[in-house]
């Protein structure tokens, strides 16, 4: 996986996470641990959709498990297509997220079965993205949660101030800083874009990430 794909995947993560948050009562689809904070708020009588948030964690696990099983099957039988299959799986789940979201619209009841299914499908899709890097054993950046990337950026900036970028090590730090910042900006741009597009076209907004994933799958197919 090339570095530009980290930026595109970060953009998808920010975009889908924001659509889920805006559309589904504050549901985090990519940053799934954030839902525990929202569950705590619900316990204190603040917020709504606690069942939706409770389902997010097993849905996320299901997405990881499904991607792992598919990857292992493809690796045994069609190894060259394994990476492409993960993009196609995520695209299919996001397409199902789009369709169930349209069926559920206008989303007014967080406990409605179609709303719960919509949240489950969106979270499963992002579980697939989270698992991708580990399954492929690539050295790419985290592209769904930016906390670690922010930490790395600060450490790299201090390192460059302290030692400079002239040495081989400094050049490596500078290169890592460049791509980490690109991923962070991609995530931020995706978050803004996801909110803006959703308020205009509802769940049709998810067609954008699906198209990007299909493009990445096509690129993987050419590489294979």
Image: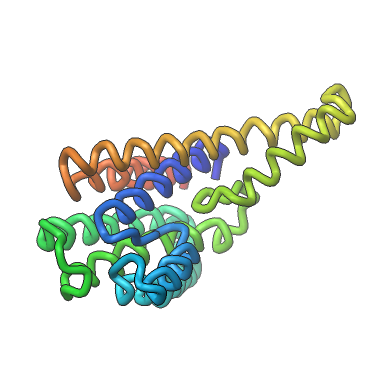
- Give the residue furthest to the top: 166
Q: Is residue 100 above or below residue 202?
A: below
Q: In this rendering, would 2 be left or right of 98?
A: right
Q: Residue at x 60, y 34 (%)?
A: 181
Q: In this rendering, would 8 be left or right of 167?
A: left
- Total labels: the figure holds 0
Q: Is residue 18 above or below residue 169?
A: below
Q: Residue at x 31, y 55 (%)?
A: 20
- Residue 183 drawn at (x, y percent): 54, 39
Q: Residue at x 60, y 50 (%)?
A: 147
171 or 148, nearer to the observer: 148
* Color theme of the render: rainbow
Q: Looking at the rendering, which quadrant does residue 111 occupy?
A: bottom left
Q: Quadrant of the N terminus?
A: top right
- Residue 53 drawn at (x, y percent): 36, 71
Q: Looking at the rendering, which quadrant does residue 97 occupy?
A: bottom left
- Residue 136 drawn at (x, y percent): 56, 58
- Residue 93 drawn at (x, y percent): 29, 61
Q: Is residue 74 visible?
A: no
Q: Residue at x 47, y 58 (%)?
A: 31
Q: In this rendering, would 52 be left or right of 159?
A: left
40 or 125, nearer to the observer: 40
Q: Is residue 104 visible?
A: yes
Q: Is residue 115 above or below residue 147?
A: below
């Amino acid at each position: 996986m090339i570095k530009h794909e980290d930026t595109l995947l970060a953009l998808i993560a920010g975009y889908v996470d924001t659509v889920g948050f805006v559309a589904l009562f504050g549901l985090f689809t990519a940053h799934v641990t954030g839902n525990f904070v929202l569950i705590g708020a619900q316990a204190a009588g603040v917020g709504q959709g606690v069942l939706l948030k409770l389902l997010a964690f097993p849905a996320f696990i299901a997405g990881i498990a499904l991607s792992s099983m598919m990857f292992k099957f493809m690796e045994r039988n069609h190894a060259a297509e394994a990476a492409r299959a993960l993009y196609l799986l995520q695209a299919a789940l996001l397409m199902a997220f789009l369709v169930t979201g349209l069926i559920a619209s206008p989303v007014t009841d967080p406990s409605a079965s179609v709303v719960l299914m919509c949240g489950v499908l969106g979270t499963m899709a992002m579980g697939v993205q989270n698992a991708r890097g580990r399954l492929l054993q690539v050295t790419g950046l985290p592209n769904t949660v930016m906390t670690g990337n922010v930490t790395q950026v600060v450490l790299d900036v201090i390192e460059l101030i302290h030692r400079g970028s002239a040495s081989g090590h400094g050049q490596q730090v500078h290169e890592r800083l460049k791509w980490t910042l690109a991923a962070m900006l991609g995530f931020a741009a995706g978050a803004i874009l996801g909110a803006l597009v959703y308020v205009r076209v509802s769940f049709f907004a998810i067609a954008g990430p699906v198209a990007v994933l299909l493009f990445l799958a096509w690129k993987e197919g050419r590489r294979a």
